[in-house]
Amino acid sequence: MPIYSPDMPQRLPVKDIFSGLLTSLGTAVRYWLHYTLVAFAWLGVVPLTACRIYRCLFTGSVSSLLTLPLDMLSTENLIADSFYGCCVVTCTLCAFISLVWLREQILHGGGPEWLEQEQDPPLMPQPLAVADGDLVLVPANNNVNDQQLPPVEGAAEVDADEADGPDLEVNDGNNGAQDDNNWNPIEWDRAAEELTWERLLGLDGSLVFLEHVFWVVSLNTLFILVFAFCPYHIGHFTLVGFRLKDYVTASQFEGLLTTLSGYVVIGIVLILLHGVASLVKLRKNQQLLGLCYVVVKVSLLSVLEIGVFPLMCGWWLDICSLTILDTSLQDREASFKAAPGTFMFIHWLVGMVYVFYFASFILLLREVLRPGALWFLPNLYDPDFNPIQEMVRLPILRHIRRFLASVVIFGMVVLLMVWVPVQLIMKVFPEFLPYNVVLSSETPVSELSLELILLQVVLPAVLEQGHTRQWLKSFIRGWCIAVSCVLELRSYLLGDVPLAGEDEKQPREEQEAQEERPDVIGGDQGNPLPDGFQVQPLGVAHQEMLHGAGPVTFQPYYQPRFFAFRLVCLLGFICLSLFIGSLMMLTLPVFIGRKLLTCWMGETKVHELYTAGCGLYVIWLLMNLATVLSSWLPKGWTVIANKLKEWLIITSKSLLATSILLGVIPLLMGLLFDLVIIIPLRVSLHQTPILYIWQDWALGVLHTKIVCAVTLMGPNWWLKRLLEQVSVHGALMLEMCW
C-alpha cells in the first residue's frame, strides 16, 4: 500500500497534471525524433551512400565522379538503391569481420613457417644475480663478459676491468625495447569494452552515433576501393591482355570472375614482391607482403572450398541425373540463360546438401571403423582440426592437390550412385524412369514447396532418428564383418581382433630379435605376431604433417600378406556396395510410394518427391515394427497384446497432437504468409486469389520450423519453455515406448 507524505493534498492540481503530461509528451517526441534520425542514418544514409559510391566507382567515367554529390541527394530509386546498398554494406561488414577473425587466428595459431622464420627473435633478458628481490638483467644477444654490472647486495661483483660497455641499469624486469615492440597505437580491447551496441547504433539517446555513421561510410568506401575496385580493374586489364574477356563475358558472371582473376594476379604479385624484399633485406616490408599474401590465399581458398566445390558437385549431380528427370543439357542451358543467378544458387545449394550428408556419413563411419582407418580424411571430431589454420599454414600446392583429390572422390561417388544405376534401370526397367516431376500448378510457390518438403521434413525425419542411425551403424559393421571374412581385413577395418601376446611381457632376447625383423613396422615391438602379419601405423606421419602436432588416436592392426591387393579388392567391394545401395534407394521407395498413392489417388500422376517420401516412411515404419516385434516375441503373446493396446492409446493421442502441431499450426502459418505477403504481390486488386492448401501447408512447415528455432535460440520466455517441454517430453515418451 503506498504511503504518502502528511502534507500531500487530496487531489493533484490540474496544473501539475498538465505539466506532467506535457513533459511526457515532450520526452516521447524527443525520443521519436532521435530514433527517426537513427533509422534515417543507418537505414537511409549508409546504404544509399554505399550504393551510389559503389556505382560511381564502377562506372569508370570522370563525369560520374563530378556528379557524385548530386547523385547522393537524388531521390530516384530510393528503395532499390537502399536494398542494393544494404547488400554492399553487408558484404563489406563480412569482409571486415573476416579480416579481424583471420588476424586472431594468425595471432593465436601462428602463421606459416616461412613467415614466422622471417620475424626477428625477441630480445629475451637473462637473469644474472638476485638479491633481496632485485633482479639484474642483460639482453640475450649480448655477452655477459662485455657488460659492466653494478654491485649487487650480497652477491659477487663483476670485475670492472673486464667491462668495455656502459653500465646496465636495474629496471625491475622491464625493457625499453620490449615496450616499443609491444606498443599498439589502437587499443582494441579497451575500445571494445567502452563501446556497446546501444552506444554504437545511437539507441542510448546520445548523438555520438553520428561519428560512427561517418566512420562506417568512410570504412565502407575504403573497403569498396581496396577489395572490389582495385581487384576488378586489375583482373579486367589482365583478361584483356590475355584475350580472355569474351569468354568471361559469356559466362554471365563477368564481375565476379573478373574480380577473382584480379585477386589471383594480386596474390602472384605479392609473392614476387615478397621474394624481392627478401633479397634486398627489407624485413618489415617482407613481413607485410607475406601477411597480405596469406590474406589473399585464405580468401581464394575459402571461395574455392565453400563456393566452387559445392557448385561443381551440384553441376555433376545434375548432369548425371538428366535421364531421371527426362531433360537435356540444352534445357539446362536455356534455364541458365533465363535466370543465371537462380540457376547457380540452386546448384550450389544441392551441392552443399550433398557435401553435408557425405560428411555426416564419414562421421558415422568413424564411429564404426578402427581409429586411424580413415587417416586420409579430415577428422571433424579432432579438437586440433582447424581448416582456417590449414589454409594459413599449408602451401598452396598441397591445397590444390587436396582439392583435386576431393573432386575425384566426390565425382566418382556421384558416378557410382547416380549415373551407373540409372543406366542399368533404363535397360532393365525402361518404364520405371523418368521420374514424374511435372507440377500440378505453374505457381513458383509449388515449385519451392516440394524441395522444402524433401529437405526440411523427409530427410531430417528419416536420417536424424536414433534408431535409423543405429541401423546404419549395425549395417556398416555387418558389411565390414562380411567383407573381412573374404579378405581377412577385420583387424584393419574394425580393430576388434586383439594382437597376439598383447598383455604378455616379452623376454629381452626375443624383443631384440623382433626389433631386427624387417617385416615389423611400428606398433608394439615387443608383441609376437603371427607369420605373415605386420603392425602397420599407416597415416600417423601424415596426421603429424597435417596438424603440426602429435598423432591422432591410432590403433595398430594386423597386415596380412598381399595387403595392397586386398585393399584394391576392398575398394571394389565398396564400389559394388555403393552401386547396389543406390540402386535400391532409387527404385524401392519410389515403387512402394507409387503403389500406395495409386490406391488412394488412382491414375493421377504425383510428383516423385511425394512418392519417394511416402516410400521412405513406409520402409522406416516397417523396420521399426520389425525391431519392436523382435524384442517382444520372446516375452509371449500376452505381453504383445498388452503392448498393442498401450500403443493404440498412445497412437490415437499422438495423432491428435500431431494433427495440431504438424497440421493445423503449419497450415495457419502458411495461409498467413500467403495472404499477407505472396497474394498482394502476385494478385492485382481486381482479381480473385486462389489458395493452394497443400502448398501453404508446405510453406507453413518451413515457417514453423524457423519460428521454433529462433525461439529456442532466444531469451527465456513462456513460448521457449513450452517448446522445450514439448520436445523433451515427446522424446522421453518415445524412448519409454520403445
Image (cartoon, rainbow, N blue to C red):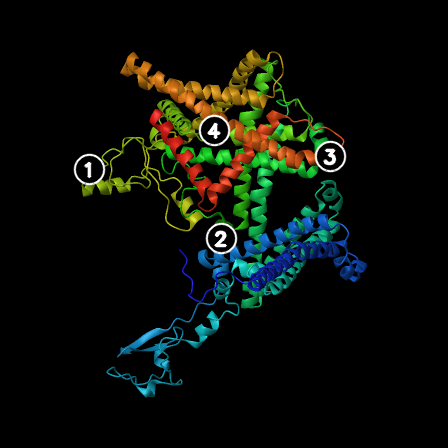
How far apart are the alpha carbons under marks 2 and 4? 40 Å
Quadrant assignment for the N terminus: bottom left
How far apart are the alpha carbons under marks 1 and 2? 43 Å
Disc 4 marks which residue? 461
Res 580 visible: no
Q: Amino acid at mark 3?
A: Ala
Disc 3 marks which residue? 338
Q: Observer-nearest residue: 212 or 259?
A: 212
Disc 1 marks which residue? 504
Q: Observer-nearest residue: 318 or 729?
A: 729
User: Which residue appears farthest toward the bottom when viewing the image?
Assistant: 161
Camera-nearest label, 4 or 1: 4
Of mark 1 and mark 2, the one earlier in the sequence is 2
Instruction: Indicate left or right for 548 with 89 as reference.
Output: left
Q: Amino acid at mark 1?
A: Glu
Of mark 3 and mark 4, the one earlier in the sequence is 3
